[in-house]
Amino acid sequence: MGLYAENHERVERLFAVSGLDEGSYRSSVGDGLDLRLEVVARHAYTVELTLSYELLDPLTGQPDPSAHLRVYGDARQAEATHCYVGRRWQDTLGLRPPHGALLHHRLRMNAFLNKWLAYLAEQGHGPETLSVFEADENSCRIA
């Protein structure tokens, strides 16, 4: 649970998601790799969001890398519920993986998220680099 608490601290420091409305946002630090954050849903104590660069996987057309997050404000925890880094978890683990394999996979996803959030902070992403995203015909959309 310490990893989930650290992820919460990092995602809040980076994007202050507890104060964001539902919608799409872009964070740009001038490195050519704009980050997309989409607040998918807000609930009483939980925010669901996606993070992705504006890069598309050439095979699927989906943003890659991307992470789907659930941020628990009351428990001060944030978890990656699933990630897309080239392959879906079903491609890696099968449709009915053993519980230990699934737990190990979730730990790896959240370790990936932790390192990615640290990298984003090092690159200069933060609340001041975040702006409301206006979609156009040349932009990718997080599904």
Image: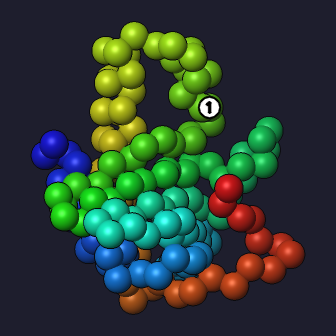
Residue 50, above or below 97 = below
Closest to the observer, 82 or 87 = 82
Instruction: Give percent across and percent down for residue 80.
Output: 39, 47
Secondary structure of residue under mark 1: loop
Q: Is residue 137 left or right of residue 69?
A: right
Which residue is at the far right? 137
Q: State the quadrant of the N terminus.
A: top left
* Quarter of the figure with residue 31: bottom right
**Residue at x-position 51% and y-position 13%:** 96
Place of residue 36 in the rendered image (x, y in percent of width and height, measured from the top left):
57, 69
> Is residue 110 rendered to the left or right of residue 83?
left
What's the residue at 54%, 65% (across, down)?
Answer: 40
Report the side of 116 relative to 41 (left or right). Answer: left
Coloration of the structure image = rainbow
> Picture quarter containing residue 137?
bottom right
At label 1, counting other C-alpha atoms closer than 10 Å, the crowd grade (few under 14, some 14-19, many 20 or more) is few
**Viewer can see residue 122:** no
The residue where tag 1 is placed is 87
Vertical side of 114 occupied by 42: above or below: below
- The foreground one among 18 and 138 is 18
Placement of 67 over or under 111, stated as above or below: below
